[in-house]
Amino acid sequence: MIDCGKSFNCEDTLIHYLIPDGAITLFPRFGLRCIDVCTISNPESNNQQALLLSHDHADACFGLDDLRYPDRLTSQPLTFQSSLTLRSTFSPVQDSIPIYASSETYTSISRMFPYMVDARYATGGGDIPSFNWHPFDPSQPFEISECGGLEVMPLQVEHGMYFSDGQGRPYMCMGFRIGPVAYVSDANRICEETKAKIEGCRVLILDALRETPHASHFSFSEVSPPYNLAILFLCFRNLTL
Amino acid sequence: MSLKPAPEITYWVGFAHQTDHYTLEAELKAWSEKTGIRIEPAFDGLEIPLLEE
């Protein structure tokens, strides 16, 4: 799976009644089980699963804590026989979930949720998720060993700005290219270096928030022809004059 | 002038709540027919193979 945001499990929240689109609601509707969709799996990987994080915003990582719950993402009646990673009460789907995140995202989550990176920081009596963190260098491809060595190319894109330091430094979010598929879910600008890494993909999944401009997301006019040549690289930057 | 392969398809994701899926789908289809550039809104249940066939 790529990202695990705050609506990952909204079944038990008020949000569920307003926007019933949490993964825990939708996945069973399509006959998907958690082990199939929570993660990137490979037939040769013995069903080991992994999670990619694109950035540290709430809609990308505030569902991490829910990756310990029983495996309710199934079309079958809840049996409470299995869980994602809990060992004390249930039979876990796997001992821990490997998480791949940029060093910046890993550091940020370490500050926000210390117990998620080191169980010694847990302060309550409840269970905590079990993760195995793999910080990566955003400039280099990496392999997900748990998924049969699946190669992933990080795609650094701009997704808003830091204004706290007074310099307006871009906030960088990760997209990912896996084989013929490039995934950029949160972006308002893509640099030339990253465009080159996207080039040649067969399928592009691209952020497109709304018609009006936004500070940290592409608007429709920025990602559709013929309005913005800066984005048309996707199709026309390959013109060689 | 040569034209290298573009993505076969681009899926848009992350729409705000003001967006009507079917209206956007129709608009993008019209654009795609004019430009030859295939763009569609992603949808729940969409499956995209990650491995080359």
Image (cartoon, coloured by chain):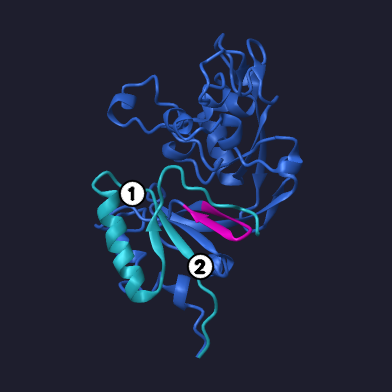
Secondary structure type for disc 1 = loop
| Disc number for residue A166 | none
Provide the major secondary structure of the magenta segment.
Answer: strand
Left or right: residue A148 compared with residue A58: right
- Chain coloured cyan in the rendered structure: B
Where does the N terminus of chain A fall, quadrant-wise?
A: top right
Q: Residues within 10 Å of mark 1 (few under 14, many from 20)?
A: some
Q: Is residue A65 left or right of residue B43?
A: right
In the rendering, what colour is chain A? blue
Q: Position of residue A47 (x, y in %)?
A: 70, 35
Q: Nearer the viewer, residue B39 or A217?
A: B39
Q: Which residue is mark 2?
A: B7
Q: Position of residue A53 (x, y in %)?
A: 55, 42
Q: Which is more toward the observer, A108 or A204?
A: A204
Left or right placement of residue A48 versus residue A172 in this view: right
Query: Measuring 49% from the left and 53% from the top, which residue is drawn there?
Result: A172
Q: The disc numbered 1 marks a residue on which chain?
A: B
Counting from the top left corner in percent of width and height, residue B47 is at: 52, 48
Q: Which residue is mark 1?
A: B15
Q: Locate residue A99, reporting x and y percent.
A: 63, 37
- Which region of the structure is painted magenta? A174-184
Residue lying at 52% horizontally and 68% vertically, measured from the top left: A195
Quadrant position of residue A93: top right
Q: Work out whether residue B13 or residue B35 is closer to the camera in this orientation and state it.
A: B35
